[in-house]
Image (cartoon, grey):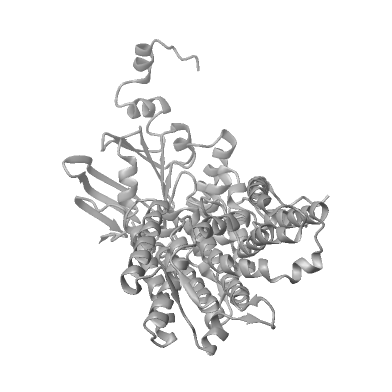
Amino acid sequence: MTAPVLELRNIDKSFGPIDVLHNITLQVKAGEVLCLLGDNGAGKSTLIKTLAGVHQPTRGDILMDGQPVQFSGPRDAAGRGIATVHQFGGTFPLMSIGRSFFVGVEPTKGWGPFKRFDRKTANRIAVEAVQNFGITRIDDGDRLVGGLSGGERQSLAIARAVHFGARVLILDEPTAALGVKQAAHVLRIVNEAKRRGLAVVFITHQVMHAMAVGDHFAVLIRGAIAADFHKGEKTREEISDLMAGGESMADLEAQLGTNATV
Amino acid sequence: MLNNLLSRPAAASILSLIGVLAFYVIFGGVDLAKLFGAASWMNYAARIGIVALPVGLLMIAGEIDISIGAMIPAGAMTTAIISGYYGLPIGFGILGALTVGVLVGLFNGILAVKTSVPTLIITLGTLVGMQGIVLAGSKLLTGNASVPLSAPDWAKGIFGELMFGGNHQNLILWWLGLTVVFWFVMHQSKYGNWIYALGGDKVSARNAGIPVDAITIRLFVLTATSASFVGMCHAMLFNSAQVSGGMSDIFNIIVSVVVGGVLLTGGFGSIAGVFIGTITFAIVIKGIDFTDIDRNWANLIIGLTLLLAVGMNESFRKFAMRATKRKPA
């Protein structure tokens, strides 16, 4: 069996006297979607930032392909193929699709000090990359990113990460701000990334979305892994209960006196 | 076609320029041929335009520099004190003016990247501070607030002289040349893309590997140095330098840039827009002398042009966001 692409072993993270993560052990393999579930404040953001090289773990090891690694910063992690896509796509609303796709790695033509940004090539590659992910509505690289829908922006960011050789895709609440249709759109892209053999870490608090694409689930409560299970091992209700901190949703609803009618 | 044109940052500035010209022709009885040949507005456009170019870049990158208002007299006084009062060769005066620009730019830029103080406040500090330094320094060294300078012919021929036996300053050629250089950097080279990214989202830009701090510092150096360059050229042209002046330039330059379609919050704008915005501003201010309108109304027209242009920019930008390729019918 091949080693997981990315693995955390007994990771602790504290900021001064405040412990945020305790003893986190996780792994994600190529072609697999790991769903990280957790309520607000459970430590999801800190965990993502540790994976993306923004924070160094206080204790414990990060392994890539079975080898221990230390990220000196987000660029180092990105260089090793870890790409993070944030809730709003991390893109530039007032830039064109072609320009924003190649920010920092602009293709140029020409010579010496007269090297020019190759707009045509940039637009063509960007549009191709997005269309390969099934977003055929994007066909003009000169369009502004801000004119795209939330789902399309997410898709553009994911396509960009894949184009530049990402092996691990960290998706931070990609469906949180989206409507039902747009979310389905993004979930299809996640599946496509998985099919291409990427290791995907999918952070969400929407159990439905997690169950639609996840192979492996981890529930984070107060900075620790409260449950770690595979697809089909738990029902939706059980997962919701876990996320609510062990209290069952039914109890919670009774407490609030609101018997949900769904 | 129209779609494409309107979604460009310069669209509003072109319409503003046409509007102002139409207004002057219809209500002021302007002779357009005479206006276009006139030196007064071109000289003024060159003065603010040379500074408006880097200020435009800086504003696209999401920052602002108002210390330029003190840097124009600072450049003039440095040249005049070194080469006029102390009589050193003009080369030292030129070098001195540019050095003062680079140093103040570095100071602004380093403070901007090292602290989280808004650059409006930082450069407000350097604006007032530099005014103090220039006035006190001039009094201390020369005992005067105005210093004469007589630059040799070769230096005047390059930096400050009238051309074609008329009233056009050769600063106009510098302005046109620099516009081409800035256009290339902003719209052709990859650095333009970096500047857009800076104004769009600094964190994402940094994560994408763009040297955010280095670019920010360089842009501040560029704005301060171009302002001291203009001051230096004017000192040679007018054979003297004064400590005062330059305060109105701050707003005139920023108005030109904003009329030119640059977004105050960064991330959007173009060199063509800044160029046309500068021309629009200069024609309103100086072109009014060619009309039957009392020149005291010029500021009102500037104010209205600004509001109109910004209003248009807002709607055109929304339009650009929406604009999709029309499906073939």
Residue farthest toward the left in the current orientation of the protein? A17
Q: In the rendered view, does B10 fall on the left or right side of B82?
A: right
- Residue B118 to residue B219: above or below: above
Q: Quadrant of the N terminus of chain A?
A: bottom left
Q: Residue at x 57, y 68 (%)?
A: B47
- Residue A195: image x %, image y %? 50, 52
Identity of the residue drawn at 60% across and 43% down: A149
Task: Pick out the residue farthest to the front.
Answer: B143
Q: Can residue A57 be seen in this snapshot?
A: yes
Residue B288 coordinates in the image, percent (x, y)? 71, 58
Q: Tell whether B87 sits left or right of A117.
A: left
Q: Position of residue B115 (x, y in %)?
A: 32, 54
Residue in front for this viewpoint, A90 or A159: A90
Numbered disc total: 0
Can you tell which quarter of the image residue B114 is in?
bottom left
User: Compared to B92, does B27 lie above or below?
Assistant: above
Image point (34%, 12%), residue name: A255
Q: Tell me if B65 is positioned left or right of B307 in this view.
A: left
Residue B153: x %, y % from top left = 54, 89
> Residue placed farthest to the top in the image?
A257
Q: Nearer the viewer, residue B142 or A67?
A: B142
A20 relative to B327, above or below: above
Residue A80 at least partly seen:
no
